[in-house]
Image: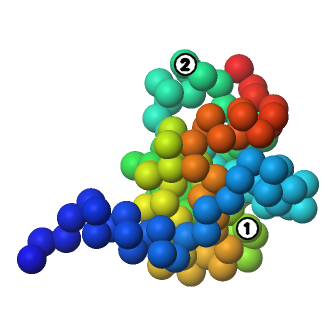
């Protein structure tokens, strides 16, 4: 039987911890990196969480692999990673991917709105 999006989401949600905005703010204060997985057009429309690194979901594997010429040095295997997208689906799938790649601590904030509703600062 083929793998479905529902199957992938269940697997991702089973291993990627979901956190709230207050927890994300504390993790950032403690040295975590937040990655905004949304597309550029989404960021242009809403802005992004202050201090977040923008890596679109389609480029994550290339930016997360130290052997890739596109590697993003903000990502380190031992540095906690907070992921968010628009509603949390892409963040869950991306979180499982990073865990599979060897990242030690990866969490899903959910959507950008979760950050904003928790009073997180936004860069326009």
Q: Is residue 67 left or right of residue 74?
A: left
Between 19 and 78, the one nearer to me in the picture: 19
Q: Is residue 117 visible?
A: yes
Q: Dot 1: what SS?
A: loop
Q: Quadrant of the C terminus?
A: top right
Q: Quadrant of the N terminus?
A: bottom left
Residue 54 position in % (x across, y down): 60, 41
Q: Please state the horizontal and vertical placement of residue 121, each as a whole percent of the image.
A: 81, 32
Question: Is 59 situated above or below 69?
Answer: above
- Which residue appears at 32% of the width and 67% of the height? 8
Q: Examine the image and state in which quarter residue 31 appears.
A: bottom right
Question: How far, Cα to Cα, is label 2 from label 1?
Answer: 27 Å
Q: Disc 1 designates what residue?
A: 80
Q: According to the image, what is the colour scheme of the structure?
A: rainbow
The residue at the point 51 percent across, 54 percent down is 91
What residue is rendered at 61% in x and 75% in y? 103
Quadrant for residue 108, please give it. bottom right
User: Where's residue 115, x and y in %?
Assistant: 70, 40
Mark 1 Cα shell of 10 Å, populated few (<14), some (14-19), many (≥20): many
Tell me the residue that label 2 is attached to: 45
Which numbered dot is residue 115?
none
Residue at image x 50%, y 27%? 42
For label 2, the crowd category at 10 Å Cα-Cα, with few meaning under 14, some 14 to 19 and many 20 or more, is few
Q: Is residue 57 above or below residue 104?
A: above
Tag 2, which secondary structure? helix
| Upstream in sequence: badge 2 or badge 1 | 2
74 left or right of 31 in image: left
């Amino acid at each position: 039987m083929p793998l479905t999006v529902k199957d992938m989401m269940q697997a991702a949600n089973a291993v990627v911890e979901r956190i709230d905005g207050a927890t994300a703010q504390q993790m950032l204060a403690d040295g975590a990196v937040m990655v905004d997985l949304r597309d550029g057009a989404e960021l242009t429309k809403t802005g992004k969480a202050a201090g977040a690194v923008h890596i679109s979901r389609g480029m994550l594997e290339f930016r997360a692999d130290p052997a890739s010429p596109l590697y993003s040095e903000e990502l380190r295997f031992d540095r906690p990673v907070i992921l968010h997208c628009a509603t949390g689906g892409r963040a869950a799938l991306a979180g499982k991917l990073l865990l599979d790649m060897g990242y030690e601590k990866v969490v899903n904030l959910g959507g950008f709105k979760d950050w904003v509703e928790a009073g997180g600062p936004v860069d326009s």
